[in-house]
């Protein structure tokens, strides 16, 4: 895996642990020699993950829509900052640049990015791994929702299995790179 896209909040969240997790992930991505692809902002967890990757000597590609450059303070320190015309173009470009995806805690934008990339995998537009960094059990309710959708027949087990999850960045990056893990099981059956 040469590049990984991280979806995460433009806010820091209510607990310091989220910022720390973003910094750890950014640093680890750089230390593994991977390029970080992200939403291009310098605020919230987006800024924390990018800054940590850059400080660790990593390559960072930000992709941000023109109308959000001022709102999210487009991060000019990125190795490359691509300004695009729309949110749709942003997501498509991030998907082009990456070998896998990680969602960290975030809000509606993060959920939108995560579910769109899951849907693209479901309909065969890509076969790249998709993971959740479950910091502070943030994604436990989402996991329950997906399990409910499987049990109710709206999501197939194969599609649920596309969503990988770990509580720390080291394990999640290992899972995304196809290394064995104790966490990578049939979590939706629990």
Image (cartoon, rainbow, N blue to C red):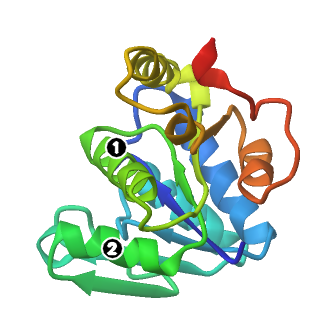
In front of the other: 153 or 111: 153
Neighbourhood count class around disc 2 (C-alpha, 10 Å): few under 14, some 14–19, many 20 upward: few
Quadrant location of residue 188?
top right
In front of the other: 43 or 87: 87
Local SS, label 2: helix
Q: CA distance from mark 1 to mark 2?
A: 23 Å
Local SS, label 1: loop
Question: From where the camera sits, is residue 73 visible?
Answer: yes
Q: What residue is at 25 percent from the left and 62 percent from the top?
A: 72
Q: Nearer the viewer, mark 1 or mark 2?
A: 2
Q: Are marks 1 and 2 in contact (CB under 8 Å)?
A: no
Q: Is residue 137 left or right of residue 141?
A: right
**Residue labelled with disc 2:** 92
Residue 99, given in percent of the width and then of the height, sits at: 60, 71
Neighbourhood count class around disc 1 (C-alpha, 10 Å): few under 14, some 14–19, many 20 upward: some
Q: Is residue 41 left or right of residue 28?
A: left
- Residue lying farthest to the top in this orientation: 190
Quadrant location of residue 53?
bottom right
Question: From where the camera sits, is residue 44 visible?
Answer: no
Residue 169, given in percent of the width and then of the height, sits at: 71, 46
Q: What residue is at 50 percent from the left and 23 percent from the top?
A: 143
Vertical side of 94 occupied by 46: above or below: above
Q: Is residue 161 left or right of residue 42?
A: right
Vertical side of 112 occupied by 124: above or below: below
In front of the other: 148 or 59: 148
The numbered disc on residue 11 is 1
Vertical side of 114 occupied by 140: above or below: above
Residue 176, given in percent of the width and then of the height, sits at: 71, 54
In front of the other: 26 or 6: 6
Q: What residue is at 57 percent from the left and 45 percent from the top?
A: 162
């Amino acid at each position: 895996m040469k590049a990984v896209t991280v979806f995460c909040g433009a806010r820091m969240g209510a607990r310091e642990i989220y910022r720390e997790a973003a910094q750890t992930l950014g640093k680890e991505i750089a230390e593994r020699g991977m390029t970080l692809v992200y939403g291009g902002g310098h605020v919230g967890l987006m800024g924390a993950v990018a800054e940590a990757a850059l400080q660790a000597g990593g390559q960072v590609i930000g992709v941000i829509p023109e109308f959000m450059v001022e709102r999210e303070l487009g991060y000019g320190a990125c190795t490359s900052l691509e300004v695009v015309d729309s949110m749709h173009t942003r997501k498509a470009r991030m998907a082009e640049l990456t070998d896998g995806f990680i969602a960290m805690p975030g809000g509606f934008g993060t959920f939108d990015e995560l579910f769109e990339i899951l849907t693209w995998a479901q309909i065969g537009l890509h076969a790249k791994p998709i993971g959740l960094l479950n910091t502070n059990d943030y994604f436990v309710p989402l996991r329950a929702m997906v399990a409910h959708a499987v049990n109710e027949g709206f999501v197939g087990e194969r599609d649920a299995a596309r969503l990988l999850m770990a509580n720390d960045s080291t394990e999640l990056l290992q899972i995304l790179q196809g290394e064995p893990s104790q966490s990578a099981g049939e979590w939706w059956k629990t």
